[in-house]
Image (spheres, coloured by chain):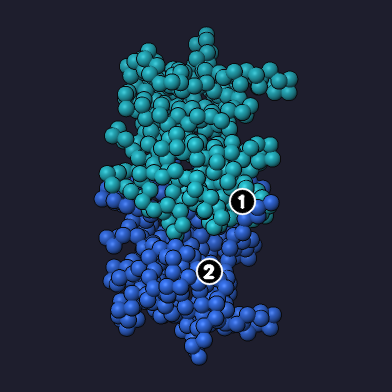
Chain colours: A blue, B cyan
Amino acid sequence: MERELIRWLRDHLPPHRSLRLGLGDDAAVLNMAGVDECVITVDMLTDHVDFELAEVDPRRVGRKCLAANLSDLAAMAARPMAGVVALCLPRQGGLELAKGLFEGMIPLAEQYELAIAGGDTNSWDGPLAVSITLLGGVTERGPLRRGGAQPGDRIVVTGSLGGSILGRHLDFEPRVREAIALHARYELHAGMDISDGLSLDLARMLEESRCGAVIRADAVPVSDDARRLSQHPADGVTPLNHALSDGEDFELLLAVPPVAAQQMLAEQSVDVPLTDIGEFVSDAGLWIAEADGVRRPLEPRGWEHRLDNR
Amino acid sequence: MERELIRWLRDHLPPHRSLRLGLGDDAAVLNMAGVDECVITVDMLTDHVDFELAEVDPRRVGRKCLAANLSDLAAMAARPMAGVVALCLPRQGGLELAKGLFEGMIPLAEQYELAIAGGDTNSWDGPLAVSITLLGGVTERGPLRRGGAQPGDRIVVTGSLGGSILGRHLDFEPRVREAIALHARYELHAGMDISDGLSLDLARMLEESRCGAVIRADAVPVSDDARRLSQHPADGVTPLNHALSDGEDFELLLAVPPVAAQQMLAEQSVDVPLTDIGEFVSDAGLWIAEADGVRRPLEPRGWEHRLDNR
């Protein structure tokens, strides 16, 4: 990492009890005493794909990059511990850009008690790429996985869905506290974050859990953003379909046994609304049920990085 | 990560005792029982900067990317544990490229008992970027740091230096085993890997250690590659200067108390030659001493990612 940036970061990064050795050496050193299991996740976000740097303050970009990674810890109901940040910076203005990105990350890291342990910066002739790796501590309940949903479980989501492109995809709150609190208080069979679209992410949970699911159309918490987007003359997508297939909601998708779900819905013990949107079934497949009870197959749709095989 | 790549990786990644949960969930889960301290390092390598994808087999590129990161663990004398790989892939041929990169990484990971725990793949209109984060276990001696060199210590390096651009920068062996073995057997005051050039990396060690150093010109182990490069009519750089300032040697640079250094040099207990190239001194600065004993200041030179401040 460039010396001026290291100096700046040493002045701006808060100390953290887990950090035995921070910036300036070949690697950082973390205190892992008492940690039996940790989760590790990496996510790379890039200009023109995950954000438009020309249109957004670098601090919002930096915050989003870290928040998307924190959402992966939330998906596992893991407690944020430490992370490292690798940047590919455009040559021109790279140092100021790097500072701006970190200015966006640091308050969020503090909020979630995450140590920013180190990083790597490169300059090149390409667009900005931000790769963040986070470590999280597993709670007593163990990691929350995708693969445990069972027929009969309720499908529960946090918040409201769809239309994040109107701004929420930059400024969302990762559901770290909610995931840990719900995992501690209720029996959860499976969980993940909704990063690529409800129907697509639910299909992934079904694949890992080897079961199917029926979503109740009238139960899906459609966001105001989804409605607003749908009203645009050129949009042509219903609010419900936005909620089913738009990416970057970063809400939680949970498989909850019926009794626990009933209690969870009644108690609403976290700061964000919890909604029962349907149930897991034994038949493989994904369906949507209208108010009249008629089911039709639902094609999983959402955001996918398609790799070209040519 | 794309489903086809996940499936391919599940077939090709070897199991590992540290890996409680691998690919396919929002994060991997690592067994950290008994690990009190771990080091974490990230390094992003990019096309046209660290390799030329058009000219090199993706397997060599993948191997280099992982080896450069392993060298950072060697720099801390840490035992490789687990890593995650994030790829930004050009859209065309991205899947085949990703497989090629992993085919280069997997044998090296096995050789160093490193678990490849997970990753992230993105496709975009930019060049290939590979970001790898590694975790390493600290040995009983603790992490080997840059900041402990003391006046009177000998400067010891592994291998021979300079001219890696002729091919060694792709196919080098990270000095993981050597670092751990030397750290266990001898008293080392400081250590790092030579990734950006001997004089530049030594200057960084001096800055962290708050002392100076004198390199003996005739003691520097100049590589055959450095000599070959120097013979090129258009080169205009002496073999010694290649050894002092070329990047990507990925050898070890150690600060060793005199008695331990004498023993280390006599025993040559690792598979790569160990050479005493000079000493640390109390005056801040870096000098080179010719055979006649005359010292002149040595400007630290090497590879730096310069961030533009405009």
Q: CA distance from mark 2 to mark 1?
A: 21 Å
User: For the residue carrying disc 1, how many other residues have a C-alpha within 10 Å: few (<14), some (14-19), or many (20+)?
Assistant: many
The tally of labels here is 2
Q: Position of residue B128 (x, y in %)?
A: 62, 47
Label 2 sits on residue: A200
Q: Amino acid at mark 1?
A: Leu
Label 1 sits on residue: B95
Q: Position of residue A112 (x, y in %)?
A: 38, 62
User: Could you tell whether B44 is left or right of A258 in the image?
Assistant: right
Instruction: Examine the image and state in which quarter residue A27 appears.
Output: top left
> Is residue B27 placed above or below A267 in the rendered structure?
above
Measuring 33% from the left and 78% from the top, which residue is drawn there? A258
Q: Position of residue B243 (x, y in %)?
A: 56, 23
**In the image, farthest residue toward the top:** B292
Q: Which mark is residue B62?
A: none
The secondary element bearing badge 1 is classed as: helix
User: For the residue carrying disc 2, how many other residues have a C-alpha within 10 Å: few (<14), some (14-19), or many (20+)?
Assistant: many
User: Could you tell whether A201 is left or right of B124 in the image?
Assistant: left
Q: Amino acid at mark 2?
A: Leu
Can residue A71 be spotted in the picture?
Answer: no
- Parent chain of label 2: A
Measuring 27% from the left and 60% from the top, which residue is drawn there? A140
> Is residue B58 placed above or below A258 in the rendered structure?
above
Front residue of B181/B305: it is B181
> Is residue B29 placed above or below A238 in the rendered structure?
above
Measuring 53% from the left and 69% from the top, which residue is drawn there? A200
Front residue of A184/A112: it is A184
Q: Position of residue A218 (x, y in %)?
A: 49, 86
> Is residue A175 placed above or below A142 in the rendered structure?
below
